């Protein structure tokens, strides 16, 4: 008899384990990534709670003195990935990148704790001040415009989605000098961001490196600054979870409550009245991206979604066969297999479903689970999928897809509730 999907998923987590931290997938992504690691922890919590906490602890070992949790931790040199530590040059130990990634750690730590409170009590008490420092960093360095902002498309985790096109248009990528990409040696180039994208990604990194990763300078004068609805929704939810954890630990959480209030008010700045949803906005020019993809669907994470907004979102979802797309299939720039410019990402669906379930939309949550599960069952534990025909894309044996299978997609409705 063959191995069950659950067994395969557990094996993927174990085989991507590099000794306390988990890489997203061998070859393409050989380091520890911030939000991937938090999802890995959630996955481990279904069969090894101790290992789940270790994963988060390793990630926070790389936290900067400023509170920032970097988006990549370069624990061991690996020539298979570009841009590596020699490009970022952050002067930290361990070497890391100089930007962050969606702060899902508090959201997932709370779920991990809920699954096995006894195993997590001491671990969360030790982690709480570090989580708090990282949320304070987000408030201090990324939320001054009201909503949460990103200083590099990589910071959003949704690298090349159309949401960032207006901000990327301001970036001059013509003077970055020669370099060799590694991603296209692992995965078909047609599924990856373009060379023009990479030139600009590197120009933004070069600016950060040039100012010694001074975050005030990056926000003030860096080549790219966009408000991100997804980050705002995630951060609101993460603040709420952190406050709940803090209250349980007997802490005063009024500072966190203040951040939640400010961010919720900040949502008005990214309301696109023409589109009728929250939308990415270039903070240098004020221009909206005019895109409707998975970022807008994360609204459920931060609270209830009005019926007219829900109708607009579901109309986009109805255009696909397999889950919520990263960009609207009805838009002319939709590319069903090019990374974040259209594909369906199981890991994002899992986050959206958390919001849907909490908002009492278990019907939509179950539809999303079933469509995600069907694509993984048919295609394997890939990084992402073509939302129209379910073709598995990107890296195989992917940690976060295995993790969300174990915690969500592979559970039936009764278990998930
Ligand atoms: C992708 O991003 C990296 C840069 O961080 C890349 O393309 O090189 C994104 O999908 C990101 O969200 C993810 O965390 C990372 C590792 O899975 O890969």
Image (cartoon, rainbow, N blue to C red):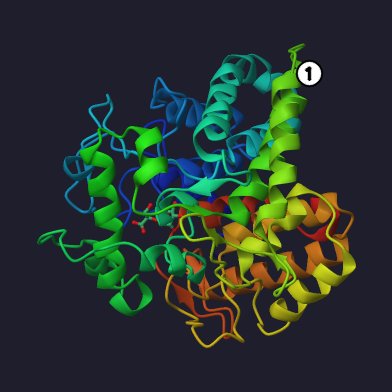
Residue 101 vertical position relative to residue 59 in the rendered view, above or below:
below
The N terminus lies in quadrant: bottom right
The foreground one among 62 and 276 is 276
Residue 193 image point, x, y percent: 34, 70
Q: Is residue 37 visible?
A: yes
Residue 248 vertical position relative to residue 197 in the rendered view, above or below:
above
**Residue at 39% from the left image edge and 25% from the top image edge:** 64
Q: Quadrant of ligand 1?
A: bottom left
The foreground one among 364 and 276 is 276
Q: Quadrant of residue 202?
A: bottom left
Left or right side of 396 for 266: right
Residue ranking furthest to the top: 250
Asked whether mark 1 lies closer than 8 Å to ligand 1, one says no
Please state the total of marks drawn on the protein image: 1
| Helix, strand or loop status at disc 1 | helix
Residue 173 image point, x, y percent: 23, 64
Q: Quadrant of residue 17?
A: top left
Q: Quadrant of residue 19?
A: top left
Left or right side of 241 for 226: left
- Crowdedness of circle 1 by 10 Å Cα count: few (<14), some, many (20+)? few
Residue 306 image point, x, y percent: 87, 62
Residue 133 image point, x, y percent: 54, 22
The foreground one among 146 and 98 is 146
Residue 168 vertical position relative to residue 25 in the rendered view, above or below:
below
Left or right side of 117 for 72: left
Left or right side of 190 for 181: left
Q: Is residue 417 visible?
A: no
Can you identify the residue that label 1 sits on? 248
Residue ranking furthest to the left: 178
């Amino acid at each position: 008899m063959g191995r069950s999907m659950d067994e395969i998923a557990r094996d993927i987590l174990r085989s991507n384990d590099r000794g306390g931290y988990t890489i997203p997938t061998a070859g393409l992504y050989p380091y520890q990534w911030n939000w991937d690691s938090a999802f890995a922890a959630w996955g481990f919590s279904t069969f090894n709670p101790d290992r789940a906490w270790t994963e988060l602890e390793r990630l926070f070992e790389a936290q900067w003195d400023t509170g920032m949790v970097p988006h990549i931790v370069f624990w061991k040199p690996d020539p298979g990935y570009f841009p590596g530590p020699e490009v970022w040059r952050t002067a930290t130990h361990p070497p890391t990148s100089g930007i962050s990634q969606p702060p899902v750690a508090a959201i997932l730590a709370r779920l991990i704790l809920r699954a096995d409170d006894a195993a997590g009590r001491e671990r969360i008490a030790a982690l709480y001040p570090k989580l708090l420092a990282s949320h304070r960093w987000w408030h201090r360095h990324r939320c001054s415009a009201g909503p949460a902002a990103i200083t590099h498309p990589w910071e959003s985790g949704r690298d090349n989605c159309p949401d960032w096109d207006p901000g990327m248009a301001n970036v001059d990528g013509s003077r970055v000098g020669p370099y060799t990409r590694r991603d296209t040696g692992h995965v078909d180039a047609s599924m990856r961001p373009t060379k023009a994208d990479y030139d600009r990604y590197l120009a933004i990194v070069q600016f950060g490196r040039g100012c010694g990763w001074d975050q005030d300078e990056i926000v003030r004068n860096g080549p790219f600054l966009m408000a991100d609805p997804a980050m705002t929704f995630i951060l609101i939810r993460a603040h709420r979870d952190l406050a709940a954890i803090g209250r349980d630990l007997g802490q005063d959480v009024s500072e966190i409550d203040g951040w939640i209030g400010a961010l919720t008010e900040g949502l008005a700045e990214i309301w696109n009245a023409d589109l009728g949803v929250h939308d990415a906005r270039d903070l240098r020019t004020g221009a909206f991206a005019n895109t409707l993809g998975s970022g807008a669907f994360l609204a459920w994470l931060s609270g209830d979604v009005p019926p007219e907004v829900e109708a607009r979102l579901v109309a986009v979802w109805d255009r696909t066969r397999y889950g919520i797309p990263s960009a609207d299939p009805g838009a002319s720039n939709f590319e069903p297999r090019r990374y974040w410019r259209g594909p369906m990402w199981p890991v994002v669906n899992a986050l959206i479903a958390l919001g849907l379930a909490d908002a009492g939309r278990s019907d939509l949550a179950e539809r999303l689970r079933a469509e995600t599960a069907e694509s993984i069952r048919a295609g394997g534990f890939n990084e992402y999928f073509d939302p129209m025909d379910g073709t598995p894309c990107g890296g195989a044996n992917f940690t976060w897809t295995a993790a969300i299978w174990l915690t969500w997609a592979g559970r039936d409705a009764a278990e998930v509730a």
